[in-house]
Amino acid sequence: ETGVTQSPTHLIKTRGQQVTLRCSSQSGHNTVSWYQQALGQGPQFIFQYYREEENGRGNFPPRFSGLQFPNYSSELNVNALELDDSALYLCASSEGPLSYNEQFFGPGTRLTVL
Amino acid sequence: SQQGEEDPQALSIQEGENATMNCSYKTSINNLQWYRQNSGRGLVHLILIRSNEREKHSGRLRVTLDTSKKSSSLLITASRAADTASYFCATDHNTDKLIFGTGTRLQVFP
């Protein structure tokens, strides 16, 4: 078990709604990365936050937004939910933003959009 | 888009056998990492190999990297039922962001 926690564990929403997912990073980590994992696929990078600033973004529309707090916990917000947003959302924390910093993943939030 | 592709997509073996899975990627990298995921849960980091390294070991794991062929392999020796999981390679293609492959689903039968 890593020290990264995510809430909620499961969530069911309907199309057009908005959702907020939360992630608590491991102690001593200042970087949080968010990933979307569709069923049977590998995780896809959404964005990364380093010391409360966005530090890179994947190929996701602006309705995916995030925030990092002074304690380095983070939120992922998705507006105007679509059916294809149904997926496992993973956050990972690390000691820094560089790719060689080991990422510690949380257990994920499974989002279902009906 | 996915940077890497693992091969095979699925692999079934008996306990005690070795499991080999391969990863191919498309652009140059600084490092390549392998992760394990149990039943749609969070990923666990297994090993990182830098672009100037050719082979790395960690316990029963052996990773090789061939940058000329843009490929890597993960070997799990003397597999156990507890090794049943999906295995992903992740590359950085010279950025600080990890791009994951499509994964290999490994089933180890007791």
Image (cartoon, rainbow, N blue to C red):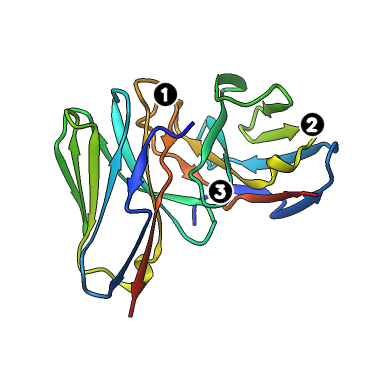
Q: Is residue A71 left or right of residue B98?
A: right
Mark with earlier residue (2, 3)? 2
The quarter of the displayed image where residue B20 is located: bottom left
Residue situated furthest bottom in the rendering = B110
Q: Which mark is residue B96?
A: 1
Tag 2, which chain?
A
**Residues tagged 1 and 2 counted as in contact (Cβ below 8 A):** no
Tag 2: amino acid: Asn
Spatial CA span between label 1 and label 2: 27 Å
Please state, as top left, top right, bottom left or bottom right, where the C terminus of chain B lies in the image: bottom left
Tag 1, which chain?
B
Spatial CA span between label 1 and label 3: 20 Å
Marks 2 and 3 share the same chain = yes
A93 vs A113: above or below: above
Tag 3, which chain?
A
Residue situated furthest left in the rendering = B54
Q: Which mark is residue A79?
A: 2
Q: Which mark is residue A106?
A: 3
> Residue, x 76% and y 38% (percent of image)?
A82
Which residue is at the front of the view, B63 or A32? B63
Spatial CA span between label 2 and label 3: 22 Å
Is residue A28 among the parts visible in the rendering? no
Marks 1 and 2 share the same chain = no
**Residues tagged 1 and 3 counted as in contact (Cβ below 8 A):** no
Residue A67, image x and y in percent?
A: 68, 27
Residue B100, image x and y in percent?
A: 43, 38
> Residue, x 66% and y 50% (percent of image)?
A109
